[in-house]
Image (spheres, rainbow, N blue to C red):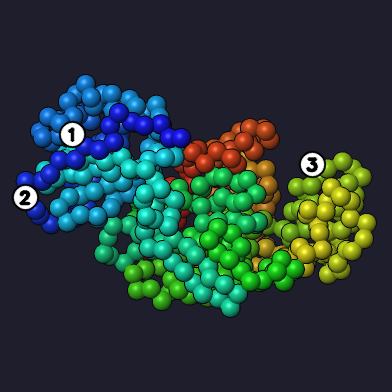
Amino acid sequence: MKKTFFIVLYITFASAAYAQTNTPEAKAAFKRFLDFYAQNNADSIFMLFSEDTQNILPLNKTRQFISQMHSQLGSIIKSEYSAASADYNVYKSYFEKPGYALFLNFDQNNKIIGLFLKPEEDIKTTDTLLSPDNISLKTEYGTLYGTLTLPDTTAKIPVVLIIGGSGPTDRNNNSSLGLKTNAFLMLAEALRSNGIAVLRYDKQGAGKSRSSKKESELRFSDFVNDASRFIDLLNKDERFSKVIVLGHSEGSLVGMLAVQQQHADAFISLSGAGFTADSILKRQLKGSLSEPLYQSAEKILDSLKHGERVKQNIPAELFPLFHQEVQPYLISWMKYEPSKEMTRLNIPVLILQGTTDLQVSMADAKALKQAQPKARLELIEGMNHVLKKSPADPAQNMQTYGEPQLPLHQELTDKIVQFIKALNK
């Protein structure tokens, strides 16, 4: 059962109706609120209230209210502008601990005239922390769903298509296998705040996207075709000045192949492999399996690399990775060599790699750079595979895979924004 606040709703009414937009002054006022909340500074928040709100919610109650929000809901992790009323600038915020969303109404003087805490289940939105345009794309095997995050502007802007990595990865870089990072959601919001739109989507069989295909029918090219469809969709949208494809992990190779099918203005490889899938898997399994098990895995991978399915003598410990239904997909994946595909790109390329990535190494990034000498290679100190700041210690590093509240590594956003802005020069 959710904890109950001593106050759920404080709303005052504007003295006159007026047409409001998300003005720079309102944005600045809202940012002051966020800064004061982060500092647990109720007294400064009180000074942002209109006179009527101060009368309804005096300083002692404001202190109690802010203190209870901190203790019960934690930090504010995401915020957005919500044009829900013609009379106010309305902003919506979400907390570290789920349960409630906070709505703030600002009047024409950029004073807070309404505070509204509402249970999240009562908020009608199809996205976890954002409510931009929701995208659906029909295919012959089902419908793919995604989220288009748009900055508050009418000008033409660049858009980034984010392609997720291996497994049932959704639009937020979470999965049903226990991965909980919200990394793509955070990246979308960070890019939006820098005037860049983002389209991210649930992979086939992940999140809201469903597929009529059986696992044994799935091929690597299916994910490439999905990405190509989204690139085509963005190219036809007149709101966008440039289309940039960003592939994370396995999505890097998917993106390289997709931009060979559909035009893109630039490509970003984020924690992308530089070698074939069998080489990557061998490297990952080498340190995690006993020597006899590794020898078995190596033989299976060699067979699959040559297009030969393995039907017998699969150790029980390796069965989840190499069962019969998944082998056709692995075979289709292993035929591609990322560094070779990188040579075929004739657009600006940014290669980003974290130094504490346990799954993809700096050697992979350097192999991609060698294949594409004109590419820009950026190594991010202390960034791991899920794009968070992390030590190299495996136990501490892997812990971040299940901590969605951790922020992105700050340098990541900075380097992506710099690269995209340089495209216009």
Helix, strand or loop at mark 1:
loop
On residue 48, which mark appears? 1
- Report the number of numbered marks: 3
Indicate the quadrant containing the C terminus: top left, top right, bottom left or bottom right: bottom left
Residue type indicated by callout 1: Leu
Residue at the image position 36 percent from the left and 59 percent from the top: 132
User: How far across and down, in percent of the image, does residue 22 sit?
Assistant: 22, 53
The residue singled out by tag 3 in the image is 288
Q: Seen in the image, is 319 located left or right of residue 351? A: right
Q: Residue at x 58, y 66 (%)?
A: 210
Which residue is at the far front? 1
Instruction: Judge depth for marks 2 and 1 and give the one in front.
Output: 2
Label whose residue precedes the other's in the sequence (3 or 2): 2
Residue at x 18%, y 44% (from the top left corner): 106
Q: Is residue 291 above or below residue 18?
A: above
> Which residue in the rendered view is the most extreme toward the left?
16
The residue identified by callout 2 is 16
Q: Quadrant of residue 310?
A: bottom right
